[in-house]
């Protein structure tokens, strides 16, 4: 166990994945909100995190699982203790900046927490038709003319940046369609194709965020029940497109035309 002493920091408040979150760490890219007068859904705070969990029932190269506690280690950078879908405690290694830690909190750590809560977490981006919100990397910023809205780097050593949407969409929207991207090749022709129900179920299962962790944290029947619930109201399509930014505008136009055709 670490013997470090942690000084309490100012609290930040966010709305993430439909949850009210309080955090001692500033989370750039998350939707800020005003504090509310009741207990938050999720707490993120700095604290002592062990190197391993006593009584672990499952382990991996960088993680331990014991009951409703998941320990995640990012060697030489940061450790997380994630409990019951409610609490994330993090401890950084000396010299690792808080601004870099935020990327791990919003990525893997929060994904694990959502798995603990029994959510279906997909590895992808979301766009609201009447209030667009997108997340893209550096080269995309350059090609799409978003350089003026480019924010701080996700990590100081990575050429990936936050892009602030003009109108953050805080309220959840019903999911009506899922597009699964595939690269064009001789066996796959360009275009949009609706997947059959069995293929759609396999695809959504495959596209889960951190599927190995999900398999440890959610019973298989629960996951498939979530997939079935999504497919009861959303259609799944495979979008096959050529790779390369020179084809990007054509791909966007094809998706827009197909989306409009769905009504």
Image (tube, rainbow, N blue to C red):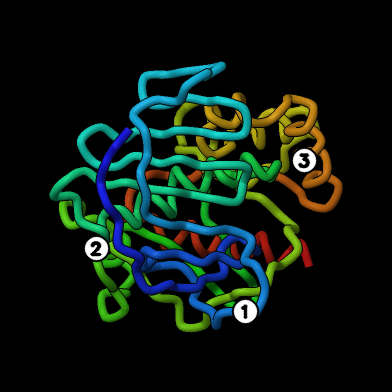
In the depicted structure, whether residue 27 falls above or below residue 110: below
Of callouts 1 and 3, which one flags the residue occurring earlier in the amino acid sequence? Answer: 1
Q: Which residue position holds label 2?
A: 153
In the depicted structure, whether residue 184 falls above or below residue 30: above
Which residue is rendered at x = 62% and y = 79% of the image?
A: 36
Q: Distance of mark 3 from mark 2, alpha carbons?
A: 34 Å
Q: Nearer the viewer, residue 146 or 44?
A: 44
Instruction: Residue 257: give x, y in percent of width and height.
Output: 63, 64
Q: Nearer the viewer, residue 71 or 50?
A: 50
Residue 246 visible in image: no
Residue 36 marker: 1
Mark 2–mark 1 CB contact (< 8 Å): no
Mark 3–mark 2 CB contact (< 8 Å): no
- Residue at the right extreme, as displayed: 232
Q: Secondary structure at mark 3?
A: helix
In the depicted structure, whether residue 263 falls above or below residue 188: below
Which residue is rendered at x = 62% and y = 28% of the image?
A: 67
Of callouts 3 and 2, which one flags the residue occurring earlier in the amino acid sequence? Answer: 2
Question: Quadrant where the N terminus lies?
Answer: top left
Instruction: Residue 244: give x, y in percent of width and height.
Output: 33, 49
């Amino acid at each position: 166990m670490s013997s470090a002493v942690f000084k309490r920091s100012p609290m930040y408040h966010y709305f993430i994945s439909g949850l009210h979150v309080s955090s001692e760490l500033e989370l750039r890219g998350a939707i800020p909100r005003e504090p509310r007068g009741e207990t938050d859904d999720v707490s993120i705070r700095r604290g002592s995190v062990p190197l391993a969990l006593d009584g672990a029932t499952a382990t991996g190269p960088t993680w331990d699982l014991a009951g409703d506690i998941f320990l995640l280690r990012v060697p030489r950078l940061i450790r997380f203790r994630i409990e019951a879908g409610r609490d994330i405690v993090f401890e950084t290694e000396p010299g690792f900046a808080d601004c870099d830690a935020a990327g791990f909190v919003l990525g893997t750590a929060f994904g694990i927490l959502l798995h603990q809560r029994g959510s279906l977490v997909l590895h992808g981006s979301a766009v609201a038709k009447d209030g667009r919100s997108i997340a893209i990397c550096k080269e995309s910023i350059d090609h799409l003319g978003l350089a003026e809205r480019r924010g701080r780097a996700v990590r100081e050593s990575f050429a990936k940046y936050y892009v602030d949407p003009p109108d953050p969409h805080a309220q959840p929207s019903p999911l009506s369609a899922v597009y699964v991207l595939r690269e064009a090749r001789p066996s796959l022709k360009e275009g949009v194709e609706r997947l059959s129900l069995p293929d759609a179920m396999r695809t959504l299962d495959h596209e889960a965020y951190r599927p190995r962790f999900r398999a440890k944290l959610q019973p298989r029947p629960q996951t498939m029940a979530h997939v079935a619930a999504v497919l009861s109201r959303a259609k799944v399509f495979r979008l096959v497109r050529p790779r390369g930014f020179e084809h990007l505008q054509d791909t966007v136009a094809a998706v827009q035309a197909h989306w409009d055709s769905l009504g």
